[in-house]
Image: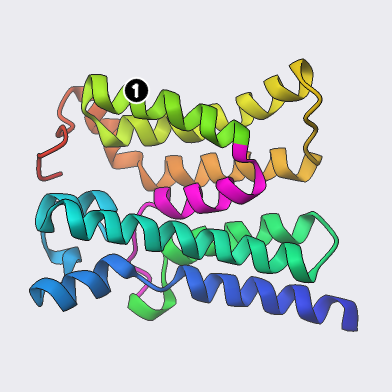
Amino acid sequence: MATFILPVFLIVLSYGLGSISFSYIVSRKIAGIDIREHGSKNAGATNTLRVLGVGPAVLVLVLDALKGSLAVLLSLYLTHDPVWPVLAGLAAIVGHNWPVFFGFKGGKGVATTIGVVAVLTFLPGLLAGIVAILAIVIFRYVSLGSLIFVTLLPLMIVLLDRLTALSYPTVYVIGVFVIMILSYIRHRSNIVRLIRGEENKIGGTA
């Protein structure tokens, strides 16, 4: 029983880290506003870009990614079972999406996902990220790039496993599938707007 105390504590801590809404904090400090009441009303880096500009958005992106990385790094350092780092990363993402400190009204988890993936599956994440960035540059839909990123992650892991010497634990593959599902859930309104051709491009308000 005692062997589960530390991992469970790490999961709770990771959720707490994820629940720190840096877009809310930065918007309060810089502009005295609640970012969830402006722009797309999403508590994330993209909406921070729309409302406050590049500098604050980059700050939020980095901080949101760092909390995901920190959650996974702590679990990797303190535990030996690959299940726990995956669960810690997922907990951080869930915390960002549904933060206990901010009425469970959070963001869409993309930046925190980037932080988690950067530690767990760096090369697949990098390759998926390159494709996602190219899609954003070409089509100017951040939501589309985010969805491409999470969709390609498991595919890249399987592809690299087959074509290279890289090998990831099965639980990592399961983890990125869960990440993909969480992202689809948080982006469901964006998916509808993309299908209808109503999604705002970079610089829009939704």
Q: Which of 66 and 185 is in front in this view?
A: 66
Residue at horizontal 54%, vertical 71%? 15
Q: Where is residue 66 in the image (x, y as percent from the top left)?
A: 47, 61
Residue at horizontal 62%, vertical 41%? 176
On the question of residue 94 being in view, the answer is no
Which quadrant: the N terminus? bottom right
Q: Which of 130 and 90 is in front in this view?
A: 130
Say above or below: 189 vs 43: above
Residue at horizontal 45%, vertical 56%? 65
Q: What element carries label 1?
A: helix
On the question of residue 146 being in view, the answer is yes
Q: Is residue 15 left or right of residue 133?
A: right
Q: Position of residue 128 (x, y in %)?
A: 50, 29
Count of marks overlaid on the render: 1
Q: Where is residue 137 in the image (x, y as percent from the top left)?
A: 25, 25
As for residue 115 lying within the magenta part, the answer is yes
Say above or below: 89 vs 193: below
Residues in magenta? 103-122
Q: Main secondary structure of the magenta part?
A: helix
Determine the residue located farthest toward the top in the rendered image.
163
Q: Is residue 88 left or right of residue 40?
A: right
Q: Where is residue 203 in the image (x, y as percent from the top left)?
A: 10, 39
Q: Name the residue under label 1.
A: 134
